[in-house]
Amino acid sequence: MSAQALTIDLMIRYGFQVLGAIVILAIGLLFARWVGNVTQRWLERRAMEPPIRTLVVRTVRIVVLLMVLVVALDKFGVQIAPLIAGIGIAGLGIGIALQGVLGNVIAGLTIIFTKPFRVGEYIELLGVYGEVKTIDLFSTTLIHMDLSRVVIPNRKIIGEILHNYGTVRQIHLKVGVAYGTNLNEAFAIVREIIGRNPRVLKEPPPLLGVTTVADSAIMISIQPWVSVSDVIAAQAELYQSIIEGLRANTIEIPFPQREVRLLGSS
């Protein structure tokens, strides 16, 4: 039999099977995407954490794709039972080789379901800090105030001491006033300035008081609460407003100085 005849014979024998498998795969991909989108819209109407919603949607899509793949292989004439057995053996070997990756997945599921932190909260651990941007199966992404990102493998997070600030943070400001200052007047001015700033939260109330009696000034501690995203902007605005407000009310902000006396010899 010539090569041309052999090609025609193979096309006649397997062509419709291959075409049918391709059509099933194409329809299956579209169907999996559609089912995933429907599932996501349905879950968005439920009180569910974004990482859990993402996990459920991805799982639904993968299950649909696996079902479609089995149907396509069966259409192509592949024996499914030996294939599944082979995949199981291969999966065991791959699992041993990818212990670190599987560890990240298990840790990611632990984070998603135990919720030690959530998207939008500000956390600190392992010497890094930032606002939680995403929680995936393999890693957690933090974003800094300068918009840089820190990607932490999930297995590094589980078992570590974690400081969760939540969605608000308390900023710590200090300003020095002269020893002759009327402290009640200074406190009233600072409270008014803090109350006018739209970034400062009304609850919890800000803390205000004397923190240190320094060599050249009485140090006033100012600790208002702001949203995580407003930390840098609020700190800059408040410092400027406090300095201008104290100066406008003739309250001296002293600079460090020393008095030197020369004693003549007897």
Image (cartoon, rainbow, N blue to C red):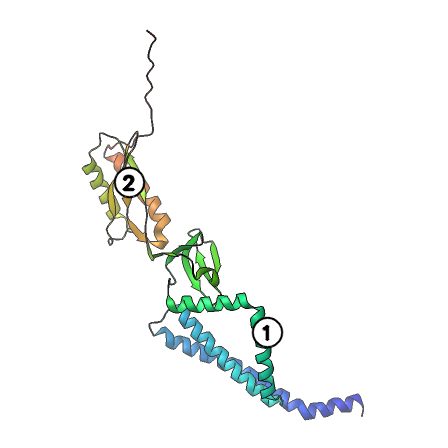
Can residue 249 be seen here? The reply is yes
**Secondary structure state at the residue bearing disc 1:** helix
Amino acid type at image mark 2 = Ile
Q: Is residue 98 left or right of residue 13?
A: left
Q: Residue 242 carries which label?
A: 2
Near mark 1 (Cα within 10 A), the count class, few <14, some 14-19 or many ≥20, is few
For residue 1, which quarter of the picture? Answer: bottom right
Near mark 2 (Cα within 10 A), the count class, few <14, some 14-19 or many ≥20, is some
The vertical placement of 179 against 84, above or below, is above
- 83 or 255, which lies in front? 83
Q: Which residue extends farthest top?
A: 266
**Secondary structure state at the residue bearing disc 2:** helix
Can residue 199 be seen here? The reply is no
Q: Which of marks 1 and 2 is nearer the N terminus?
A: 1
Q: Which residue extends farthest right?
A: 2
Proximity of marks 1 and 2: CB atoms separated by less than 8 Å: no
Q: In which quarter of the image is the C terminus?
A: top left
The residue to which callout 1 is attached is 93
For residue 122, which quarter of the picture? Answer: bottom left
* Residue sitting at x 58%, y 88%: 81
Q: In this view, does 84 lie to the left or right of 254?
A: right
Q: How far apart are marks 1 and 2 (CA)?
A: 65 Å
For residue 182, which quarter of the picture? Answer: top left
Looking at the rendered image, the disc whose residue lies closer to the viewer, 1 or 2, is 1
Give how far across and how far down residue 258 sits, in percent: 33, 24
Amino acid type at image mark 1 = Gly
Q: In this view, does 192 lie to the left or right of 105?
A: left
Give how far across and how far down residue 179 sits, in percent: 24, 30
